[in-house]
Amino acid sequence: QMVKNVESNPFLICTVEQRMSEELSMVPAISHAGKLLPIDAPPISSPLFSSQYCLIPVLPSDVLTAGETEKFFPPSVTDEHNEPADLRPHNSWTTTIQETHPIEMLEVQLVNSTVPSLLVSQFTELLAKSVHSDSPHGSFVINVTSTEGQFAAPKYHGHHAHTNMAKAALNMLTRTIAEPMKVRGIFVNSVDTGWVTKMTPGGIQTAQTAAAPLTTADGASRIL
């Protein structure tokens, strides 16, 4: 979710980050594969944040033995985005609706459709205000979507239904609010960034899925 032409609020951003840090610090260290992962480092703003916490088991399928952790998450191996490599032979992209854990189902809906809806509802007045001051040509709400959210997509094979549902909901948000928001000088669009990441599991990649045809820079340029 990208909201353009919104007045920055450093105090609000710092307050949210501080609150998240405080809540995380209250959580005890989590044991994973016989090791303790400290919750108090690194800070949320650090690029190492996701690298460390991606190994904390959330779902039953995340619980790995020490040998499996070494095999599927080699410490010194990163992907094309400099994130820890995930070489598991099965991931969210290949799950069926029967295999999708309720926590993951809810998380995907929350991130991809619920939170964008809340952001738009809370920032509408600020966006409308900027039309008359900072941005006379209008303000923009860009909902980042994907082909999987389109009902007209060529084929569906029964996998990652939760992701498809979330993106379809985001597209419906765009279609529902675009007209009334336009009257206020706020233009709402959905943008498909294109295929920029390897979504298939590391263990079953083929020549066709080994590399994405676009880069993250390509995807960002479509949005901007």
Image: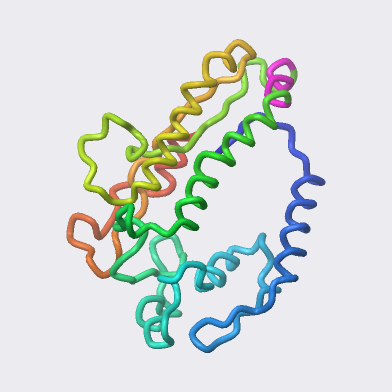
In front of the other: 168 or 140: 168
Closest to the observer: 52 or 166? Answer: 166
The residue depicted at 39 percent of the width and 47 percent of the height is 162
Residue at image position (53%, 24%) is: 188
Relative horizontal placement of residue 117, taking residue 193 as reference (left or right): right
Residue 186 is situated, as x and y percent measured from the top left of the image, at 60, 19
Please, which residue is most extreme toward the left here? 207
Considering only vertical position in the picture, is 92 above or below 165?
A: below
Q: Which residue is drawn at 69% across and 66% down?
A: 43
Q: Which colour scheme is used?
A: rainbow
- What residue occupies the far right of the structure in this picture? 11
Which stretch did the figure color magenta?
126-132
Residue in front for this viewpoint, 128 or 170:
170
**Image quarter of the N terminus:** top right
The image quadrant of residue 154 is top left
Residue 81 lies in the magenta-colored region: no
| Residue at the spot 30% in from the left edge and 52% down from the top edge | 212
- Give how far across and how far down residue 109 sits, in percent: 49, 45
Locate residue 37, reporting x and y percent: 60, 80
